[in-house]
């Protein structure tokens, strides 16, 4: 079965108003689209999609780039790059930028003050209007678990990482990410804020019908605000498959180095930003994301030069995006290993 055949099967298996599945194999691209809604005039492949937590892979790549230039150190204390007064809890002062990137900071997923709203209104954007000062106040009130002792996924931590990088360089985070990551990699279809009508895909709730308009992510932009075209995601993946062809070679290589193992029996490997699983011929690396109305997945298999990006404008397990995209990538790894 060809890569195009497998990609077509994946498009058919994902249930959403708009679906894009894009594959790169040693530089040869295949982009297929589908969905239950009428396609937009410009085509689904031309829209920018909300990446949700895939944004973290961009932010941590920024960390690696700045560390490579000596602007920050990966093992710098977080509080060294935040304004005074310092948080009162001693454990907070032990958190490093590496802890934030690898979800080992001891911080909760989101500030505790946001939990009631998230539970009562799961489709309401509680991040909108949540500014940097509020984020820093929340950090000051939080007593983290001892950093480095457990893996716990944290949007809170990545938001603080973005804040620290911005303050360390004296540059607002969107401008910093654009200058140090997006421009060097040629990602002209990637941004952190919604665009004009017709440029961005419209998300939907779990029912696949109720629209979810785009919104700002406030201080949590480093954790979840990036939106990109399928073509840009393939370019991003190709940079990771062939770091030497990019101006960010050292940083791209650095984010792929295994950092820790976690989960039951410590069977899961995590790099500075990617989840890493065994696969035929060598490991595959991946990350997934979701916003209030969209879902995304990207992953790559360095041994075979294969990358997969999948996007859908529906939020919910019934969409089947993550499992389908992961299975597609794994199958393509097997095809390559089998000759």
Image (cartoon, rainbow, N blue to C red):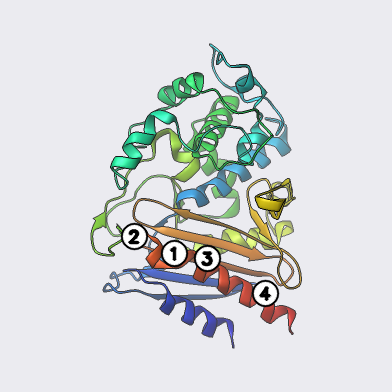
| 319 versus 86 height, above or below | below
Residue 234 pos. (x, y %): 55, 64
Mark 1 crowdedness (10 Å alpha carbons): few <14, some 14-19, many ≥20? many
Residue at 49% x, 49% y: name it.
Answer: 53
Q: Verify CB contact (< 8 Å) between mark 1 and mark 3.
A: yes
Estimate the spatial distance between the alpha carbons at disc 4 and disc 1, rounded to whole Å.
Answer: 20 Å
For image coordinates 45% across by 20% down, the residue present is 137
Camera-side residue of 152 and 241: 152
Mark linked to residue 333: 4
Mark 4 or mark 2: which comes first in sequence? 2
Residues under numbered marks 4 and 1 in contact, where contact means CB atoms less than 8 Å apart = no
The residue carrying mark 1 is 311
Note whether 134 is above or below 48 in the view shown: above
Residue labelled with disc 2: 201
Marks 4 and 2 close (CB-CB < 8 Å): no
- Residue drawn 54% across the image and 12% down it: 84
Q: Residue furthest front?
A: 264
Extreme-left residue of the structure: 210
Q: Earlier in the sequence, mark 1 or mark 2?
A: 2
Residue marked by disc 3: 309
Q: Nearer the viewer, residue 323 or 42?
A: 323
């Amino acid at each position: 079965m060809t890569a195009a055949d497998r990609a077509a099967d994946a498009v058919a298996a994902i249930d959403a108003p708009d679906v894009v599945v894009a594959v790169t194999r040693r530089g040869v691209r295949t982009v297929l689209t589908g969905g239950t809604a009428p396609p937009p005039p410009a085509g689904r492949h031309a829209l920018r999609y909300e990446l949700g937590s895939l944004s973290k892979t961009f932010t941590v790549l920024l960390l690696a780039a700045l560390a490579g230039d000596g602007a920050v150190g990966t093992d710098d204390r977080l509080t060294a790059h935040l304004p005074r007064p310092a948080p009162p809890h001693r454990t907070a002062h032990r958190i490093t930028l590496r802890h934030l990137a690898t979800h080992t900071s001891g911080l909760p997923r989101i500030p505790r003050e946001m939990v009631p709203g998230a539970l009562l209104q799961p489709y309401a954007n509680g991040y909108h209007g949540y500014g940097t000062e509020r984020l820093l106040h929340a950090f000051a009130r939080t007593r983290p678990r001892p950093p480095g002792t457990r893996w716990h996924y944290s949007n809170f931590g990545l938001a603080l990482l973005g804040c620290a990088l911005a303050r360390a360089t004296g540059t607002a985070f969107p401008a910093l990410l654009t200058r140090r990551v997006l421009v060097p990699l040629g990602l002209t279809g990637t941004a952190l804020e919604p665009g004009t009508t017709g440029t961005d895909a419209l998300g939907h709730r779990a029912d696949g019908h109720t629209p979810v308009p785009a919104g700002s992510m406030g201080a949590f932009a480093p954790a979840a605000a990036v939106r990109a075209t399928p073509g840009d995601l393939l370019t991003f993946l190709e940079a990771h498959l062939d770091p030497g062809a990019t101006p960010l070679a050292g940083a791209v290589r650095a984010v792929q180095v295994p950092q820790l193992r976690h989960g039951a029996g410590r069977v899961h490997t995590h790099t500075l930003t990617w989840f890493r699983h065994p696969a035929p011929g060598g490991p595959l690396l991946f990350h997934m994301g979701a916003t209030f109305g969209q879902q995304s997945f990207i992953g790559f298999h360095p041994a075979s030069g294969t990358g997969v990006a999948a996007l859908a404008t529906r939020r919910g397990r019934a969409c089947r995006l993550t499992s389908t995209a992961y299975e597609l990538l794994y199958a393509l790894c097997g095809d390559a290993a089998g000759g």
